[in-house]
Image (cartoon, rainbow, N blue to C red):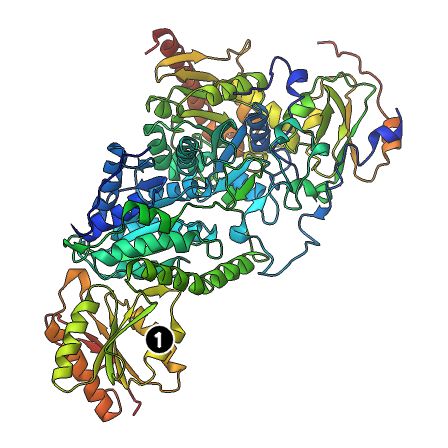
């Protein structure tokens, strides 16, 4: 398991996570806000978004894909691809569209949009789990190096 | 309708999310699990409306939207009306040939919380169903006005403490039973009404696809555990949902054409409701000796409701 | 294709029927409505045009006025032409969503057949509902008779849907007096009307799936003010479009509309300002006063929003005393229209005397004699150089004379 596979920008479209949600917004004037406060989600023709992966889409700056909530996290999920069975439980229950699955394979976490809720860890069925929570400041390589061994089944 | 394969989770995971992250829903919120799943169930274009509520205030905070589809929010009560009128406009413009792409497939969906569905928006919802518009209404039922700080709604179950049905020395919390919204919506003659839960993802996806495919107004009540107001850890959203459906606090069933009731999930081991209540802070007070009888009452209600559901399923009336 | 509905060069229509014919000729795509007296026939008629194939649109009869305007918003955001009608309590129930329609910049046309607001319940005409809508961010235009209700409804689509405007617009007419009184109306031919109104060119179309849009975003203290300011600017900037459409309409029909209408004002020293059917009565009274040697004129507010401050100053620049008529219960203040006119004249060179007359609530008649009395009082003010009456008076009210506020100004 290499650290590259835990790339913080895994599958990131160049637009992803550019804006801090609360702070640092570019607060422009009345003459520049959109008419009727309408927000277009994409730039250019977006007829085909249902068939496009995030990294293929031309998101607008108004799309929250362009924003990040990474500052919400105090703990983060770390993904261990070596244990994962690609069951996609984490994908279906992630409330923040932050599980990066492609071609039926779980590849990693979108750390711009993950809020660290830990649901993915809870629903992970492998032994040991393929996702575990670590401090936000834990080095990913160190986290993987400290992965626990398979737990023996407890006798009932 | 272009439906997404839900044969198994691997297949389903090839859907391309059209509900984006960096919305401001609480970590672990079930609302977004449900919304994501609905939007992943089809490749069709969607026109989505939302009532005021957690979903709405968290997913379109200027200058950001989390919606990759057409989306509209007007007020607390009128998502059913706005989306059904948009559906009528679509019909007119299609006939007149004034749409940008006259053949683009589209589905119309409205989301509301339980406050807007059971209470303030009920008239608008009922009106749109009576008019038989072709749309799907999804209630994200977290059993309280979470967006305004956890007040009781008519979806709040008996015994829960909320900021306006406060449990204390003289009260065990909310006194009244939850409104039976599913039966009420079925009584509108809706072709498809169901109650579903996000922990049973496939069952929920099937229901969503059925609702989207069915012509006419379809209603789905989804249990949406609220870690903030139900008082549990965000990570436990799915395990709380498991307890909800396995204790039959939230039975999963559908009603076709207003009368044909099918129970969708029969737990192998039905759990005591105590297990469900005990996992949440909002019911903590019920475990005091003076309020234990309310737990018994809730259990009795569940048993009776479950028996009644089974009789309705059998009778098909 | 819709069946051709034949119209004659001259018809005898009441205001409601006239407005409904404008909706038909404008080929409105969707009408979402809920019935309320006295505006009901407008939407009933539209429904009958749908039912008889005279129009290809759809009529959605919903369960409340709130839902009616909510539906109009959904339908308008879905890119087609949308109109409805309401009055009074129904208007009041709509108010929440009126703000949403304008905030989203949706060009909905709302025919408001003005009626009093309860309590006590009353179905007759006054302007309480119109005043209730004055801060909603809609354009508001007032028709004084059936012909104008028709003409202005047609113009409203042009103005509201213009890309430099994109604002919803109300066309007001007086309940019963205009709405239910059959009068001669000269409609445009179907073809001419269709050509004049044109087709809607949608902006931020929810049904354009190549460009998904989010309507109704949340804005807090960091953004809300900018959006509201932009909206206000759009209302202010609608003036050239309103004038352009009125000019085009005049070229087509010979019927001229101005944002401020002036009658006998060339040399007037005193005048009455009003709107609605009272304008025609005041014009009769002014003519009679002129025979008595009073240089009387009438100013009528055609466009209530955006409020025509500069035009008003211009038309009133040589007037010495003005009686502003408000047909709405003022609720503890001066009439709203009085306040607007006073604001305009306070900042003028001439600063004429301005008094306020509350009249006609709940459909109470205002007679030529009542209006002549107002002229006479204005003349007395002009002669004395100060206001000789209470600043606010109630006209044609039974019981002891009711008035408020004295002037200290001489």
Q: Is residue C152 above or below residue A14?
A: below
Please indicate whether residue A88 sits to the left or right of residue C235 in the image: right
Residue displayed at 23% across by 57% down? C147
Residue displayed at 36% across by 48% down? C195
Residue displayed at 76% across by 11% down? A153
Where does residue C153 sit, x and y in percent of width and height? Answer: 31, 53
Q: Is residue B66 above or below residue C175?
A: above
Q: Is residue B132 above or below residue B311?
A: below
Q: Nearer the viewer, residue C241 or B267?
A: C241
Residue displayed at 51% across by 26% down? B105
Where does residue C409 sit, x and y in percent of width and height? Answer: 31, 90
Where does residue C384 sit, x and y in percent of width and height? Answer: 23, 92
Mark yes or no: residue C131 visible.
yes
Q: Quadrant of the N terminus of chain A?
A: top right
Which residue, given by chain and number where applicable, does mark 1 sit on?
C312
Q: Secondary structure at mark 1?
A: helix
Mark yes or no: residue B149 visible.
no
Q: Is residue B267 above or below residue B83?
A: above
Where does residue B163 sit, x and y in percent of width and height? Answer: 48, 42
Count of marks overlaid on the render: 1
Q: Nearer the viewer, residue B47 or B254?
A: B47
Q: Quadrant of the C terminus of chain A?
A: top right
Please indicate whether residue B138 sits to the left or right of residue C19 in the image: right
Q: Residues within 10 Å of mark 1 (few under 14, many from 20)?
A: many
Q: Quadrant of residue C57?
A: top left
Query: Label 1: chain?
Result: C
């Amino acid at each position: 398991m290499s650290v590259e596979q835990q790339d913080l920008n895994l599958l990131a479209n160049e637009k992803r996570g550019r804006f801090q949600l609360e702070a640092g917004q570019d607060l422009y004037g009345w003459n520049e806000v959109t008419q009727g406060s309408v927000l277009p989600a994409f730039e250019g023709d977006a007829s085909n978004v249902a068939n496009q992966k995030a990294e293929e889409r031309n998101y607008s700056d108004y799309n929250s894909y362009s924003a990040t909530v990474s500052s919400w996290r105090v703990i983060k999920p770390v993904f261990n691809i070596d244990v994962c069975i690609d069951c996609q439980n984490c994908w279906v229950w992630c409330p923040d569209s932050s599980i990066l699955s492609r071609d039926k394979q779980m590849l990693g976490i979108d750390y711009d949009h993950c809020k660290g809720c830990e649901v993915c860890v809870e629903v992970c069925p492998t032994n040991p789990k393929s996702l575990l929570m670590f401090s936000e400041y834990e080095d990913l390589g160190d986290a993987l190096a400290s992965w626990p061994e398979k737990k023996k089944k407890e006798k009932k | 309708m272009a439906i997404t394969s839900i044969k198994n989770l691997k297949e389903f995971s090839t859907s391309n999310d059209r509900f984006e992250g960096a919305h401001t829903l609480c970590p672990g919120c079930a609302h977004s699990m449900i919304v994501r799943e609905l939007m992943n169930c089809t490749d069709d274009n969607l026109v989505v409306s939302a009532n005021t509520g957690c979903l709405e205030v968290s997913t379109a905070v200027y200058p950001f939207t989390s919606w990759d589809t057409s989306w509209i929010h007007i007020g607390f009560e009128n998502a059913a009306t706005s989306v059904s009128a948009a559906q009528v406009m679509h019909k007119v413009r299609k006939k007149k040939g004034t749409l940008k792409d006259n053949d683009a497939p589209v589905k119309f969906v409205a989301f509301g919380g339980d406050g807007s569905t059971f209470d303030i928006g009920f008239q608008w919802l009922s009106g749109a169903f009576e008019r038989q518009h072709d749309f799907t209404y999804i209630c994200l039922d977290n059993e309280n006005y979470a967006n305004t700080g956890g007040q009781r709604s008519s979806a709040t179950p008996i015994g829960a403490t909320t900021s306006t049905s406060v449990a204390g020395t003289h009260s065990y919390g909310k006194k009244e039973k939850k409104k039976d919204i599913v039966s009420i919506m079925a009584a509108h003659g809706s072709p498809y009404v169901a109650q579903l839960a996000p922990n049973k993802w496939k069952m929920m996806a099937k229901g969503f696809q059925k609702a989207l495919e069915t012509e006419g107004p379809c209603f789905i009540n989804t249990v949406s555990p609220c870690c903030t107001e139900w008082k549990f850890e965000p990570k436990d959203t799915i395990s709380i949902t498991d307890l909800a459906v396995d204790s039959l606090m939230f039975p999963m069933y559908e009603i076709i054409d207003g009368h044909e009731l099918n129970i969708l999930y029969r737990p192998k081991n039905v759990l005591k409701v105590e297990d469900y209540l005990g996992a949440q802070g909002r019911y903590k007070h019920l475990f005091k000796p003076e309020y234990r009888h309310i737990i018994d009452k809730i259990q009795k209600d569940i048993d009776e409701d479950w028996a009644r559901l089974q009789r309705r399923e059998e009778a098909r009336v | 294709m819709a069946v051709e509905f034949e119209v004659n060069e001259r018809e005898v229509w009441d205001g409601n029927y006239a407005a409904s014919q404008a909706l038909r000729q404008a080929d409105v795509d969707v009408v979402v409505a809920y019935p309320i007296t006295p505006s009901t026939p407008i939407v009933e008629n539209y429904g009958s045009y749908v039912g008889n194939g005279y129009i290809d649109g759809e009529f959605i009869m919903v369960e409340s006025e709130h839902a009616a305007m909510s539906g109009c918003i959904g339908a308008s955001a879905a890119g087609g032409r949308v109109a409805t009608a309401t009055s009074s309590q129904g208007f009041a129930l709509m108010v929440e969503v009126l703000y949403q329609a304008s905030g989203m910049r949706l060009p909905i046309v709302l025919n408001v057949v003005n009626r009093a607001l309860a309590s006590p319940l009353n179905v007759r005409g006054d302007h309480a509902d119109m005043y209730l809508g004055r801060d909603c961010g809609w354009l508001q235009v007032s028709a004084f008779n059936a012909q104008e209700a028709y003409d202005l409804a047609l113009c409203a689509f042009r103005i509201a849907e213009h890309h430099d405007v994109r604002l919803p617009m109300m066309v007001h007419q007086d309940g019963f007096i205009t709405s239910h009184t059959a009068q001669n109306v000269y409609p445009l031919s179907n073809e001419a009307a269709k050509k004049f109104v044109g087709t809607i060119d949608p902006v931020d179309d929810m049904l354009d799936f190549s460009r998904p849009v989010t309507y109704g975003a949340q804005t807090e203290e960091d953004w809300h003010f900018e959006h509201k300011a932009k909206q206000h600017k759009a209302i202010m900037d609608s003036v050239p479009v309103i004038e352009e459409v009125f000019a085009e309409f005049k070229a087509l029909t010979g019927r001229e509309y101005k944002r401020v209408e002036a009658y006998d004002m060339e040399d007037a020293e005193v005048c009455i300002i009003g709107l609605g059917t009272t304008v025609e009565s005041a014009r009769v009274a002014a003519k009679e006063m002129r025979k008595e040697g009073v240089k009387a004129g009438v100013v009528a507010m055609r466009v209530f929003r955006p409020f025509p401050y500069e035009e008003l100053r211009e038309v009133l620049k040589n007037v010495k005393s003005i009686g502003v008529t408000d047909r709405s219960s003022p609720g503890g203040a001066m009439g709203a229209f009085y306040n607007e006119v006073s604001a305009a004249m306070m900042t003028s060179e001439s600063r004429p005397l301005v008094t306020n007359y509350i009249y006609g609530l709940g459909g109470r008649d205002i007679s030529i004699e009542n209006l002549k009395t107002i002229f006479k009082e204005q003349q007395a003010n002009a002669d004395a150089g100060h206001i000789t009456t209470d600043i606010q008076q109630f006209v044609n009210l039974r019981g002891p004379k009711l008035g408020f506020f004295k002037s200290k100004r001489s």
